[in-house]
Image: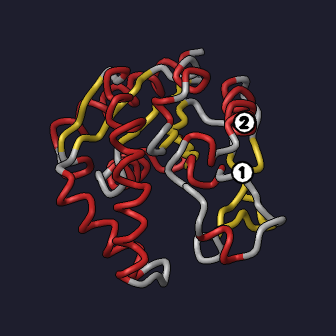
Amino acid sequence: MKIIGIAGGTGSGKTTLTRRLLELFSNRVSMVNYDNYYKRHDELTYEERCKLNFDHPDAFDLPLMEAHLKALKAGRGIRCPVYDFTAHNRSNETVEIPAAPVVIVEGILILAEPALRKLMDIKVFVDTDADVRILRRISRDVTERGRSLEDVIGQYLSTVRPMHQQFVEPSRRYADLIVPEGGENQVALEVLAARIEAYLEDADMK
């Protein structure tokens, strides 16, 4: 089983790239989103959870993600946690992710973690200008997650931007492929699709 990691800053277009690949290969490719592996904080109030730094590597449950990727690599399905962005906490729900010949892992910090990089067969970094990324984040958080413009801008300036500079941007040096503009880059999409197709053909022959 092959694992493709797709990283990049917030609003870079990594989700669009991932979705377009999933559309091309239907049920033959599975996807795991690192955002669902934010740590659970039932011990904190909603107000306290709002103040957490969600853009630092310590915000994620790395051991669980690593264990799940190893299970998928071994051909076993997993029960992936589901994160509730409106409550800033992990929900009680899980989603079954079946084992597949190819698994795409998406997340801003996946290339910053050596344990995750070791499990990846292809490492992709989606590179998009900062002004485009912040506009996309504002649109997403206000329309999809019910947050105020003031909150989104405040979080971007206090944690998102400095964490991007400290952790996300430096992780691009580990990428095998750097993709400008994410899912809108048709050439990069075709390159990745061709590699996935080759992986699937190889799996069919075994």
User: Quadrant of the image for the N terminus?
Assistant: top right
Q: Bin the neighbour count of mark 2 within 10 Å (Cα to Cα): few under 14, some 14-19, many 20 and up.
A: some
Q: Write down the quadrant of residue 75 in the picture.
A: top right
Q: Is residue 199 above or below residue 140?
A: above
**Would you call the spot at circle 1 few (<14 residues within 10 Å), some (14-19), or many (20 or more)?**
some
Is residue 20 among the parts visible in the rendering?
A: no
Q: For numbered disc 2, what is the local secondary structure?
A: helix
* Residue 138, picture quadrant: bottom left
Is residue 137 shown above or below 6? below
Counting from the top left corner in percent of width and height, residue 151 is at 43, 77
Q: Quadrant of the C terminus?
A: top right
Name the amino acid type tagged 2: His
Disc 1, SS? strand
The residue positioned 44% from the left and 55% from the top of the image is: 159
Residue 197 is drawn in which quadrant? top left
Name which residue lies at 30% across and 29% down. Answer: 194
Compared to 40, does 110 lie above or below? above
- List x then y, in percent, for residue 23: 40, 53
In this rendering, position of residue 5 left or right of residue 178: right
Whether tag 2 and tag 1 are in contact, CB under 8 A, the answer is yes
Which residue corresponds to the image point at 54% horizontal and 17% vertical from the top-left? 205
* Residue drawn 48% across the image and 27% down it: 200
Question: Label 1 belongs to which residue?
Answer: 80
Using the image, tell me which numbered label, if any, was put on residue 120: none
170 left or right of 190 in image: right
Q: Amino acid at mark 1?
A: Cys
**Label 2 sits on residue:** 68
